[in-house]
Image (tube, rainbow, N blue to C red):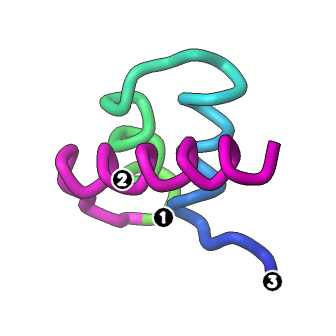
Amino acid sequence: MEPGIINQAIKKFCLSQGKDLKEVIQYLKLKYQIDADESVLRRRLEKIVDNEKAVA
């Protein structure tokens, strides 16, 4: 299953490029008009990192 837009943005900016969640918030707002809360994105990032650790 293909990951959603928000998860793709988190992986692209936070994990691949090492940028802050504020960059993800700005990207989602400008490109997709999605207003995301930083705490929600932080939980998603933690979940992604935990899943990648479990797979590895």
**Quadrant of the rendered image containing residue 37:** bottom left
- Residue 40, placed above or below residue 9: below
Determine whether label 2 and label 1 are within 8 Å by CB.
Answer: yes
User: What amino acid does circle 3 point to?
Assistant: Met
Question: What percent of the width, then of the height, locates residue 13?
Answer: 59, 31
Which mark, residue 18? none
Q: Which residues are magenta?
A: 33-56
Kind of residue sitting beneath label 2: Lys
Q: Position of residue 42 (x, y in %)?
A: 31, 44
Q: Quadrant of the C terminus?
A: top right
Left or right of 25 on screen, residue 28: right
* Residue 44 picture quarter: bottom left
Q: Look at the image and say whether residue 48 sits in the magenta stretch.
A: yes
Q: Residues within 10 Å of mark 1 (few under 14, many from 20)?
A: few
Q: Which residue is mark 1?
A: 32
Label annotation for residue 1: 3
Q: Position of residue 15 (x, y in %)?
A: 63, 29
Callouts 1 and 3 close, C-beta under 8 Å: no
Which quadrant is the N terminus positioned in? bottom right
Mark whose residue sits in front, 1 or 3: 3
In three-dimensional space, the C-alpha distance between marks 2 and 1, rounded to whole angstroms, equals 6 Å
Residue 29: mark in rendering? 2
Q: Residue furthest bottom?
A: 1
Q: Secondary structure at mark 3?
A: loop
Q: Earlier in the sequence, mark 1 or mark 3?
A: 3
